[in-house]
Structure formats: C-alpha cells, structure tokens
Image (cartoon, rainbow, N blue to C red):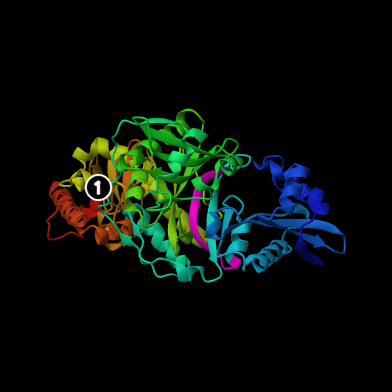
Amino acid sequence: MITVREATGRDVPAIREIFLATYGTDYTDPRYYDDSLLTRLVYSESSLMLVAEDTALGRVVGTASVDFEVGAHSDLVGEFGRLAVHPDVRRQGIGRLLMTERIRRVQDRLQVGIVEARASHPYSLKVAEAHQFAVVGFLPLVWRVRQRESLVQLVRYFAGALELRTNHPRVIPEVSALANLALKNCSLIPDTIVDEHAPAYPPGGKFESQDLTTDGYAALLRIERGRVHRREIFGPVRLHYGIFKLQARRSHYLIAREGGRIAGAVGFMHDPVDETVRIFELIALEDAVIRFLLVNLERSCREDWGICCIEVDVSAYAPRMQRTLVELGFLPASYLPALAFDQVERLDIVKMIRLLIRPEISIDGLTPTAKEVADVVLCRFRSRSVLPRIAEAVRDLSLFAGLDEEQVRRLAGTCTLAMFEPGQVIFESEHRGREMYVVLHGEVEIASPRRSSPVGVVKLGECLGEISLLTGAAHSATATALTSVDMAVLSHRDLVELVRLRPDIGLHIYRNLAAGLGEKLKRSGAPSAEPDGPTATNIT
C-alpha cells in the first residue's frame, strides 16, 4: 500500500537515492545530492516536500515538492516541481497520488500553481494535465541536465485568483496567437487587444554601467518608475527586499549612471551552473535608459558569462516593453494569465526568452495540447532566421512588392524558413496543403502527372502553392528541388490572422498573389479563362 505524507529528516537518504536513480549525477541543483542541504529543504517554510512510502516494505519510493518562492511575496505563486518516482516502481500511479496530495495541502496557501514539465520525458506533463493544469507555454532549452532541455509550462488557479484578473491586456502581434491559445486553454475568453503601433523604447543618452553596491542602493530606492509605479517587468525578487536577501538569492543589479547620478537599474539572477539569467526588475528615470540597460545586460550574457538563455516576465499590459524586447531578440514563450499581483489586481504575464544558442528542438512525444502551444512558440523562433534572408532578397520577392519597411518586417515575421536538398520533393500532386512557398535561393521544378515533360521552373522571388494556400485545394503538380533551395513558408492560418490584424498588408498580399498567378499563366501560354487547365498546374 502506498501512503503519501510530509517528508522528515529520516527520509533524506531515500530522497537522495530517488534523485540519483532518476537523474544520475546530472541534476543541476546540488541540494538534492547533499544530505545537509536536502535536510534544510525538507524543513524549510518556503517549500513543501512530500514522500510516497510503500508501507508494506517500509520504503520511500517517490517524492514531490512545492516551492513557494517562485514569485514575489504578494504573488502567492507556487511551483509544483521535482516530482520523481523511483524507476523500480513506475507506472503504478504513484506520481498521480503525489500530485493529488500536493494540491490538497497547498490550495489554501496559493492562488496560482505552476508546473514546468520536461518535454523529453512527458510523464509529469500528463500527470499535470490530468489534474487540471492548463498548458500555457513552451520554454525551449531553458534547463540543463545531461544536456539542455525544453520545458512545457502549465498553470492552475486557486482561491479566486481569476476574480482579481485585470481584463483586456495590450499585447504586440508577436504575442497575440500564444496569448489567445493560453487563455483558451485556461477556459478564459481571449480578450487581448493587439497593439500594432506601440513603439520600442528608444536608444539614446550617455550612460555608464556598473554593478550595484551599497553606495548606490539608497539613491536607486528613490526611483519609483518600474519599482512601485509603471511596473513592466516582474519576478521573485525586488530591490526593497534589501541587500542581504538579494545576495542570498544570487541577485544582482546593473545600474546606469548619467553625469554621476543614477538613472536606472536592471535586476537579474545569474545561474552559472544552469547557464541562465533571469531578469526580475527594471527601474528607470527616463525612457532612454531602459534600452541601454537591456542591451548591456544582453551583451554581458553573450560575451562575458557564457549564458545560453535569458528569461524575463513582462507585463501583458506593456506593449512598448514587449516591442523593445522583440527588437533585442527576445521572443514570447509562455503566456500566464493572472500571474503577478500588483497593487489590487492580478496581471497577465508574457514570459519572453532570448536564446543565445542554436534552437535545435524536438517536440515529439508531447500531448496534443502541449504540441499545439509548442508549435506556436517555435514558429516565432524559426521566423527569426527568415527575417535576414528576406531582408537580403526583398527587392526580388514579388509577394513583398509595394510594402514599406515596417510592413515587410511584419509579413516576414509571419513566415518560417524551410530548406530542401536537390531532388527532395517539396509537395506532391493530389496532396492537400495549406502553405505557400517563396523561393529565397535555388530553383524548383514543377511537374504535372498529365504531362511527360516538366511544366516549368520556379526561381528566386517567385511563389508556389498559392492556390492551396488560399483554397485548401489539393496540389495539381509536384514541386521538386532542382538545387539546394531555401524558402519562406506562409501558412493559411498565419495568413488569415495577419490579414485580420493588418488589412493594409492583406491588400498588398492578395494583389501581389493575383499578379503573380497572372504572370505565370501568361508565361505558360495558358488562356486566363481556363485556370484549371493543364498549363496552370505550375501554380498550385
């Protein structure tokens, strides 16, 4: 019989054995391998640790915990983390028992519960979903065990948390799709307002940066913006917690000075073992210092500290900060409704990530809901590789004709990048597809099953698959890479969303598609009144 109870000091050796059996020696948190540190964790008031005991054998076979310090003190957020079952007794429902007991014991202490489940081992993900945790994000390569791993982020609400939620967040377009999906998964009405025109914070000012010392602490406390008013970044630590607690939490501040005065600071937690940095506060006297601080911190992470990932929780009501971070290479990875408590209400948060390593990521094995969220997140990460390629070739791309620079960036950011080797089939005749391809490099041969010879060749700047994009019809021809080919890919779903938000761009897209189709028909010698004839197969 399995009994779940709160851990005691006597359970420490068994807990350590479970973690060794589960993770080997690769787990990055040393508390789970050191008896004295693990004992402190068992008795800490900032966490709850449970064990599952086989009472017949007198053996502890599983453990799970809740960390109450993942948010600020007033946030009442807990992370349901570190659920581990000994490999000898898995698939007996022990993980579900531990999760059920965790919820029962903490639901009066929390308003928000978070789970970050390993994408490579989706057992915890399935347990969390079975206990009404909703998938709200996918965090690529943010955690290191034997190698860097991705996490699926889930959330569940307690004690009327959603009654305190502020409605109608203002998000930039890059956040919109993820926000709406996360809200739907949480059984909330998608109520975001998309702000297409929020400007980023400008560069400027002659600032000097340095680490915070006790000499500048009092001066920084006098700055209200970003600390007690107009907060745009949230995290588990605040400047007013005091120097001692900041140092105990491995927290640092990079300050900006202008002519001797302190103009602002960015607070962050640096984990050299996990090779991550988390930004938790940004304090500023003026707009110009905001970008300066973020740029300098990102440069230190990239050039000095060997950081792989930078995380930041941004207010979903701060589109200017969202836009600034996107321009600096951050992308939305999670959308958490009602996460942070500020003054008298709970605010939605956008978790944004700056990856400083190449994102080679697999999402095989995820649950359908988690995979849908992961696809939305990774689409943005993949699109980052499209922007410079389109910028190089934009003058030759008929789809982008007539667009100004801002519109080009917006359309390019909706596309993903696909690469094909010579001889590789891009799509086949009679197969359905809802994507269109724009050739950025190379040549593609179009062949029809109704013809013995190729219909034609599609080259730089030209499109293929337009009819399937617009109507969902099966392809009437087969497209094969003649050379190495790079393509921008635009899906029907992303096109519909873009046109809904930006009809001005949609007008150009449809006009350019019509002109391109007409040019292909003219080039092939087909009568325009017979678009379904055999000579038109090269366009679908």
Q: Is residue 511 above or below residue 421?
A: below
Residue 296: name its quadrant: top left
User: Would residue 84 be found to the left or right of residue 533 on screen?
Assistant: right
Q: Is residue 375 magenta?
A: no
Considering the image in quadrants, where does the N terminus appear? bottom right
Q: Name the residue at 42% across, 32% down.
A: 299
Q: Name the residue at 45% across, 64% down.
A: 344
Residue type marked 1 = Cys
Q: Name the residue at 53% across, 50% down.
A: 236
Q: How crowded is the residue under tag 1: few (<14 C-alpha within 10 Å), some, or many (20+)?
A: many
Q: Could you say where residue 92 lies in the image, as x and y percent from the top left? A: 74, 63
- Total number of numbered labels? 1
Seen from the viewer's position, the closer of residues 478 and 310 is 310
User: Would residue 511 be found to the left or right of residue 491 on screen?
Assistant: left
User: What SS does tag 1 mark?
Assistant: strand
Q: Could you say where residue 300 lies in the image, as x and y percent from the top left? A: 45, 31
User: Would residue 347 be found to the left or right of residue 131 on screen?
Assistant: left
Which residue matches tag 1? 463
Seen from the viewer's position, the closer of residues 84 and 487 is 84
Q: Is residue 505 above or below residue 369?
A: above
Q: Which residues are magenta?
A: 130-143
In the displayed image of the protein, which residue is found farthest to the right?
Answer: 57
Determine if residue 474 is in view: no
Q: Name the residue at 39% across, 48% down.
A: 224
Q: Could you say where residue 52 lies in the image, as x and y percent from the top left? A: 77, 61
